């Protein structure tokens, strides 16, 4: 069960990482005179994507713990 959770967390994190790259490229492509609301929304989206990086870290930690449990069993 822990392994499925970890793999799911890593999968969601990878999707969010790709989303982060897309958002970063869109934000870089916008001209400086663009609406302030768009910039603030892109920053909010990037904050959500940073949570995906945390999911990747949690997934890796859980996978490592699962591996250690199986080694010492």
Image: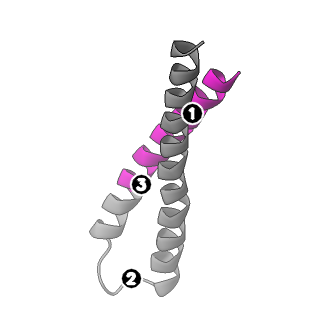
What is the number of the mark on residue 26? none
What is the number of the mark on residue 20? 3
What is the number of the mark on residue 34? 2
Q: Is residue 45 above or below residue 1?
A: below
Characterize the local packing of mark 2: few (<14), some (14-19) or many (20 or more) Cα atoms within 10 angstroms.
Answer: few
Q: Earlier in the sequence, mark 2 or mark 1?
A: 2
Q: Is residue 29 above or below residue 22?
A: below
Nearer to us: label 2 or label 1:
1
Q: Residue at x 48, y 35 (%)?
A: 60
Depth check, front residue: 4 or 44: 4
Nearer to us: label 1 or label 3:
1
Magenta stretch encompasses residue 17: yes
Q: Residue at x 42, y 54 (%)?
A: 20
Q: Main secondary structure of the magenta part?
A: helix
Q: Which x, y percent locates residue 16?
A: 49, 47
How far apart, in angstroms, are the residues tagged by discs 1 and 3?
23 Å
What is the number of the mark on residue 62? 1
């Amino acid at each position: 069960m822990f392994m499925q959770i970890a793999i799911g967390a890593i999968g969601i994190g990878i999707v969010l990482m790709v989303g982060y790259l897309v958002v970063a490229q869109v934000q870089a492509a916008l001209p400086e005179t663009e609406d302030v609301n768009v910039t603030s929304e892109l920053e909010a989206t990037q904050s959500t994507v940073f949570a995906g990086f945390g999911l990747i870290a949690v997934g890796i930690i859980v996978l490592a713990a699962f591996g250690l449990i199986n080694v010492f069993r």
